[in-house]
Amino acid sequence: MTNHPETLLREIRQTLPGLPLWTEEPLADHCSFRIGGPCTALAAPRDPEETEALCRILRSAGERPVIIGNGSNLLIDDAPLPYFVLKLADGMSAAEVRDDCRLEARCGIALARLAVLAANHGLTGLEFAHGIPGTLGGAVLMNAGAYGGEIKDVLVSARWLDADLELREAPISELDMTYRHSRFSEGSGDVILSAVLQLRPGDPDEITAQMRELAAKRRASQPLELPSAGSTFKRPANGYAAALIDQAGLKGYTVGRAAVSEKHAGFVVNLGGARYDDVRRVMAHVQEEVFRQFGIQLEPEVRILTAQSRGML
């Protein structure tokens, strides 16, 4: 962050007096892994206009913020992080149902809440997302998916601030949506603001029943009782990460207070008090063993933020 954070923070507070803003905020409190050191400052803009205004102030100070949502796919360093963090979550969660079976929603709305909204309006197509713990913005960024569905299956368009702080909107055909990837996941500095989803008419009771069934399946198969960042590794071209890790005999492999889940080998979990290095060492060992035994290189799905580098963010 800038060498004069106090001056920058003073300007932000004067220009945007109602903006929720914290200094030396522990990022462990803002991610599902419950791991992460304090950032220099964290702000939670309440609408797109406030987000844009804040980004312009930061730009004028030469500051490039780190963008997070609910932090459900993040592994964050324990060390102090010299970053200004924008948390686009609850304050950016407005959504509107259109007459043409489309949902228009801001980036910070939780996928679970969006799926329930769709169900209540008799719209089907988003059931797969009900159990994904992230936000719409994060889902668009990484083309999140589960149980055979992906955001690209329902995405019509996205709206964002580009690296030059120009407001842009484009259809899905221009967003390069592939497996766990989009144009936004390349570290371009874009700030996703909202998206439009195309759904279909359906029976609310049937939609709700399907979401309940998927939720039960998730509870039965995933270690939801422990902090994690969801699936740790992407699905390789040949096979499934969880199956390969299980076949390699790595369920329960532990370093410090981080472990490969006994319940689902695709998850690295925080047993309570895990450190960043614990998780990284577990991940490295899993990658080495799977490659040694099967010749397959596992690629992290979890996004990593360190004090030295923004990693994949």
Image (cartoon, rainbow, N blue to C red):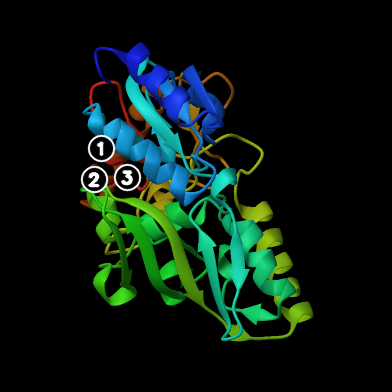
Which numbered marker is on residue 300? 3
Residue placed under numbered mark 1 in the picture: 288
Task: Establish if 251 lies above or below 149.
Answer: above
Question: In screen coordinates, is 144 left or right of 81?
Answer: right
Instruction: Indicate the secondary structure of the residue bearing disc 3.
Output: loop
Labels 3 and 2 touching (C-beta < 8 A): no
Task: Establish if 201 lies above or below 272.
Answer: below
Indicate which label's residue lies in the foreground, 3 or 1. Answer: 3
Instruction: Indicate the secondary structure of the residue bearing disc 2.
Output: helix
Label 2 CA crowd tier, 10 Å (few <14, some 14–19, many 20+) = some
Q: Position of residue 114 (x, y in %)?
A: 61, 63
Q: Quadrant of residue 103?
A: bottom right
Labels 1 and 2 touching (C-beta < 8 A): yes
Image point (28%, 12%), residue name: 4
Between the residue at mark 1 and the residue at mark 2, the CA separation in whole angstroms equals: 5 Å
Instruction: Indicate the secondary structure of the residue bearing disc 1.
Output: helix
Residue placed under numbered mark 2 in the picture: 291
Q: Position of residue 248 (x, y in %)?
A: 37, 45
Image point (40%, 23%), residue name: 276
